Amino acid sequence: MTLKTRLTELLDIKHPIIQAPMAFVSGGALASATSNAGGLGLIGGGYGDQEWLEQELNRSHNADIGCGFITWSLVEQPHLLDVALDAKPKAVMLSFGDEKPFIESIKSAGAIVICQVQTLVQALAAHDNGADVIVAQGSEAGGHAAIRGTISLVREVVDRIDTVPVVAAGGIADGRGLAAALMLGAAGVLMGTRFCATQESLMPEQAKERALEATGDTTLQSSVVDMLRDKNWPGPYKLRTLQNDTLVQWHGREQQLAQDIDEQREAYEAATVARDYDHAAVIVGEATGMLKDIPTAGEVIEEIIVEAESCLANPPGCL
């Protein structure tokens, strides 16, 4: 079973599925399992923990994987790109910041440059800067995103950029989502939330269970968790997580939170260590409502491809 697209051709992969590089969730085991199943697995470089990054690159056992970075954070620790490139990744993904300073080094190392964007303007800039793949991310995504919806953003980017593959991200977790993305003109999908709830994911088991119990209605974009984690994210981007007691208390009251931030950060850190998800964040997107089980990454990919092929042959909404 194969769906051949410009993405599968460029990356030399069997299936047009990229696993998102989620910080401290997408480790070597998940990335290698995804790649071994025919997609592209990405280790999450996150905020720049070199020891963790090196450990997870080693745990990938030389699988054909890639690595992803938060671009504005990579600016503060550019040597981490060298750490990743020394492992000879198939691709490097850059998100949330100016990718231009890093593209030449990535291409010189023989890796493919994937740039994730949240607006059409960003997509056009990434294309001009030399991106090999552009991921158009909608606000439905878990973790950080902006405000555009996936469907309209992907369509606009596809219509303006036809020289490189465009990948859809945000709210996609099954074969119907992949089929819809292909119909919009995307060459594949990037998924995070679906891969959070897999056996190889580094997300704590208690958090995975919370994700299975939730619906898209019970997620929220907010700056509260970033304030509590002391992560100075640029203004356009907010973090989508499951709603919990912390967000009920502080969302919309960020000025009051800032006045009591030291004490509240200490309490939040304690909740995170204790895996108290009434107060600590479970970082997933609106697609959490589609999760019903915790399979392997390989099983996820197989199920998605089977469903996508069925949908493309017989659209479920048609009589």
Image (spheres, grey):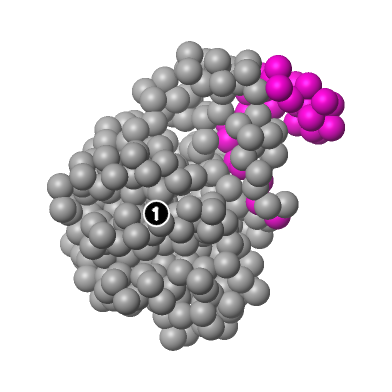
| Residue 45 vertical position relative to residue 88 in the rendered view, above or below | above
User: Is residue 123 a member of the stretch shown in magenta?
Assistant: no
**The image quarter in which residue 259 lies:** top right
In-front residue for pair 313/29: 29
**The image quarter in which residue 125 lies:** bottom right
Three-letter residue code for mark 1: Leu
Residue at 65%, 23% in the rendered image: 265
Q: Is residue 161 visible?
A: yes
Tell me where residue 285 appears, x and y as whole percent: 53, 42
| Residue 280 vertical position relative to residue 62 in the rendered view, above or below | above
User: Is residue 253 a member of the stretch shown in magenta?
Assistant: yes
Q: Is residue 181 visible?
A: no
Q: Secondary structure at mark 1?
A: helix
Tell me where residue 164 appears, x and y as whole percent: 42, 80
In-front residue for pair 232/315: 232
Report the residue marked by disc 1. Answer: 80
Q: Find the magenta span and give its range.
A: 236-264
Classify 10 Å Cα crowding around label 1: few (below 14), some (14-19), many (20 and above).
some
Residue at 47%, 30% in the rendered image: 211
| Residue 122 vertical position relative to residue 68 in the rendered view, above or below | below
Q: Seen from this angle, which residue lies furthest bottom?
A: 163
Residue at 21%, 42% in the rendered image: 59
Tell me where residue 57 appears, x and y as whole percent: 25, 47
Q: Quadrant of the N terminus?
A: bottom left
**Relative to 220, is 196 on the left or the right?**
left
